């Protein structure tokens, strides 16, 4: 019985770990983008990215990794979207 309980605990803990890793990976990509962006960059895109990063980091601090992934993924979409759209 203990084996099954341990197995169930492992299965249900994997998604939380995956969200944590994805959150960290997305935030790293965003920080890399900001480091390579012009130091004087201040356009709407950079401001929006900063807002999403702040929301993602706040969610991460509270342990809400799903929200961190959502916010950081939105920021990555903004970065990858062409400038004229």
Image (tube, rainbow, N blue to C red):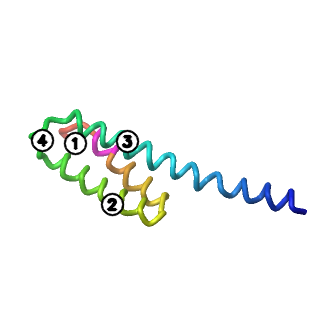
Q: Mark 4 points at which residue?
A: 41
Q: Under tag 2, what secondary structure?
A: helix
Earlier sequence position, callout 2 versus callout 4: 4
Q: Name the residue under label 3.
A: 28
Of circles 4 and 3, the one toward us is 3
Whether label 4 touches label 3, CB < 8 Å: no
Give the foreground label among 1 and 3: 3
The percent position of residue 84, horizontal first and vertical second, equals 18, 39
Q: Do the residues labelled 2 and 4 touch (CB within 8 Å)?
A: no
- Identify the disc placed on residue 55: 2
Question: What residue is shown with label 1?
Answer: 85
Q: Which numbered disc, 4 or 3, marks the residue that appears first in the sequence?
A: 3
Outermost residue toward the top?
Answer: 36
Name which residue lies at 72% across and 54% down: 10
- For mark 3, give the secondary structure: helix
On the picture, is 53 further left or further right than 64? left
Report the quarter where the N terminus lies.
bottom right
| Separation of residues labelled 2 and 4 (CA atoms) | 20 Å
Quadrant of residue 31 within the rendered picture: top left
Distance CA(mark 1)–CA(mark 4):
18 Å
Q: Give residue 37's quadrant in the image.
A: top left
Q: Distance between the residues labelled 1 and 3?
A: 25 Å
Q: Does residue 78 sit above or below 16 in this rendering?
A: above
CA gap between label 2 and label 1 equals: 23 Å
């Amino acid at each position: 019985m203990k084996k099954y309980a341990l197995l169930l605990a492992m299965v249900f803990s994997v998604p939380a770990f995956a969200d944590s890793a994805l959150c960290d990976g997305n935030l790293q990509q965003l920080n890399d983008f900001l480091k390579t962006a012009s130091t004087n960059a201040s356009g709407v895109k950079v401001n929006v990215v900063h807002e999403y990063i702040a929301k993602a980091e706040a969610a991460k601090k509270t342990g809400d990794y799903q929200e961190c992934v959502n916010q950081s993924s939105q920021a990555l979409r903004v970065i990858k979207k062409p400038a004229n759209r």
